[in-house]
Amino acid sequence: MIKNSSSVRKIKILALAQHRCNMSVFKVQRVIDQIRGRSYEETLMILELMPYRASYAILKLVYSAAANANHNMGLNEADSFISEAKVNRSTIRKKLRPRARGRSYTIKKPTCHITIVLKEE
């Protein structure tokens, strides 16, 4: 027997930043760990006051997720919270740096994927 519970749907809004975050995964992870599970307003206050460079990229992504929720689903940002926030490794961009005697060394620039999922309370 299947019980039909309340018809309240949990809507998930996803915002994804791929290849735009030119930082190491570990630097972004320490900021992501601070905002996971918090409300939207609390997340904005935390990210604006954090001294890390990664917080600006995550702040833009949280704004984008809230704008997606408002525009596409008609949801209020004040009622949402960060249900899922994760960071994954991406490709490593390589540049060549000229050195003495015509040689070159590679400079490795790590990138990452950031995923933010908002849910309505």
Image: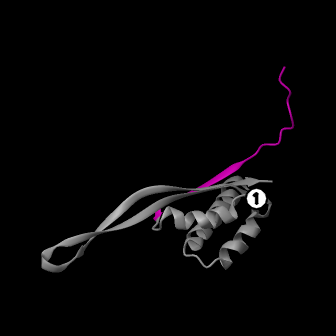
Q: In the drawing, does residue 86 fall left or right of residue 21?
A: right
Residue 7 part of the magenta-drawn span: yes
Residue drawn at 62 percent across, 70 percent down: 59
Please name whichever residue, 73 or 88, is drawn nearer the observer in this view of the structure: 88
Residue that sits furthest to the front in the current view: 100
- 116 shown above or below 22: above
Q: Amino acid at mark 1?
A: Ser
Q: Residues within 10 Å of mark 1 (few under 14, many from 20)?
A: many
32 is higher (above) or lower (below) than 53? above
| Number of dots carrying numbers | 1
Q: Residue furthest top?
A: 1
**Regarding mark 1 in the picture, which secondary structure is present there?**
strand
| Residue 80 lies within the magenta run | no
- Residue sitting at x 70%, y 73%: 46
Q: Is residue 18 visible?
A: no
The span picked out in magenta is 1-20
Residue appearing at x 70%, y 71% in the figure: 44
Residue 24 placed where, x, y %? 48, 65
Residue 50 to residue 69: above or below:
below
- On the rendered structure, is 80 left or right of 47? right
- Residue on which the image places disc 1: 80
Foreground: 16 or 37? 37
Can you see residue 56? yes
Query: What is the quadrant of the C terminus in the image?
Result: bottom right
Percent x, y of residue 115: 58, 56
Determine the image quadrant of residue 70: bottom right
Q: x, y (%) of residue 4? A: 85, 30
